[in-house]
Structure formats: C-alpha cells, structure tokens
Image (tube, grey):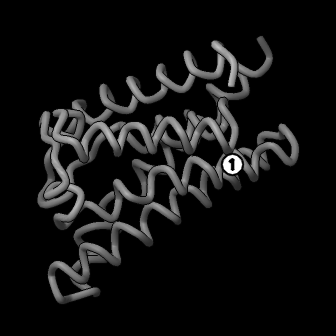
Amino acid sequence: MTTRDITYTAIFTALTIVGAQIAIPIGQVPITFQIFFVLLGGLVLGARLGFLSQALYLLMGAIGLPVFAGLTGGFAYIYGPTGGYLIAFPVAAFLVGWISKKGSSTLLNSIASLAGIAVIYIFGWLRLGLFMNDFKKAFIIGVVPFILIDLIKAGVAVTAANKLKKQ
C-alpha cells in the first residue's frame, strides 16, 4: 500500500464522515450524503481502497467515535434499525469499484453505482425489517423515499468520477 493509497483512503473516510453530518431527517432513516461518497469512493478508488475507506469509517463508528449521522457512534448504533445501511457501505464500495474497473464508460459506472445502491438498500431494508418485524413497512420507510434522491446522487457521483479520472 502506497502513501497515495493511504491518503486517498483517509480522504474518502473523512468525506463519508462529513456526508453523514449533512442530514435531512425524514423519519427513522435520514437523507444523508454518505451514499454519494460510498459510490464516489468505489468509482475513484476502486474495489480494494473503496472497501477499506468504508470499513475504516465503520470501525471508527463502532469504537464510539461520533462519525455517524447526528454525530453518533458506537456498536449499538450499528446494531440499531439503520445499521444494515452502514454495514452495506464497504460491500457497496467494493462492488462499485469492481464493476467500474471493468471499463471506464459512463454506462458502466452508472450500472456500478446502481448495483451499489441496490446492495445498500437490501442490507438496510433487511435490518430495518427485522428490527420493525414488518418488511413491507420497512421497505416503505427505508427504501421508497430515497430512490429518487439516491439516483441523483449516483448521477452526480458518476459525473464527478468521470471528471476526476480524466485528470
């Protein structure tokens, strides 16, 4: 691992922390910019470093540092109703990086980002459904309100990644 790798990984970990604090509460699951940085990290850093940046973010939160939305942290937060979304971040970043490295087209990056969002939704929805003991309600609360905004985030992440990769 090079100094450049360590630096970029740390930058995306920090960006995810900042993205968590930009939150619009709309119920149990707030709108944040974490997903934007998960997707952008996978697109820019690739599978391995994208995964590492998000795993570091989770580790920091798990040990109690206030890195999650609302400056919260601790293992209990990961275990809580929205913990599935958080646990999905490293997996999603890896998947986005892995798919996007197969080529650098906008279409492929868009497909990668959609796959990353799907992973986050599936993990988050399942955890929220288990917590609520109602998967239909969890889907309505934890997925449906976020689809449009997350598609916009994905589009911006793909555009930003394409610009960053050209430099």
Along the viewing direction, whichever of 11 and 4 lies nearer the viewer: 4
Label 1 secondary element: helix
Residue 37 image position (x, y, % from top left) = 47, 35
Residue for point 69% across, 38% down = 46
Q: Position of residue 142 (x, y in %)?
A: 28, 67
Name the spot of residue 81 as percent of width and height, x first.
18, 67
Which quadrant of the rendered structure holds the N terminus?
Answer: top right
Total residue callouts: 1
Residue lying furthest right: 103
Provide the residue designation for mark 1: 110
Residue that appears at 41% across and 69% down: 123
Q: Residues within 10 Å of mark 1 (few under 14, many from 20)?
A: many
Quarter that holds the C terminus: top right
Task: Describe residue 16's horizontal placement relative to residue 45 as left or right.
Answer: left
The structure residue drawn at horizontal position 45% and vertical position 51%, both measured from the top left corner, is 89
**Residue at the spot 86% in from the left edge and 48% down from the top edge:** 102
Q: Amino acid at mark 1?
A: Ser
Q: Nearer the viewer, residue 118 or 86?
A: 86
Task: Report the side of 73 relative to 15 (left or right).
Answer: left
Side (left or right) of 89 relative to 63: right
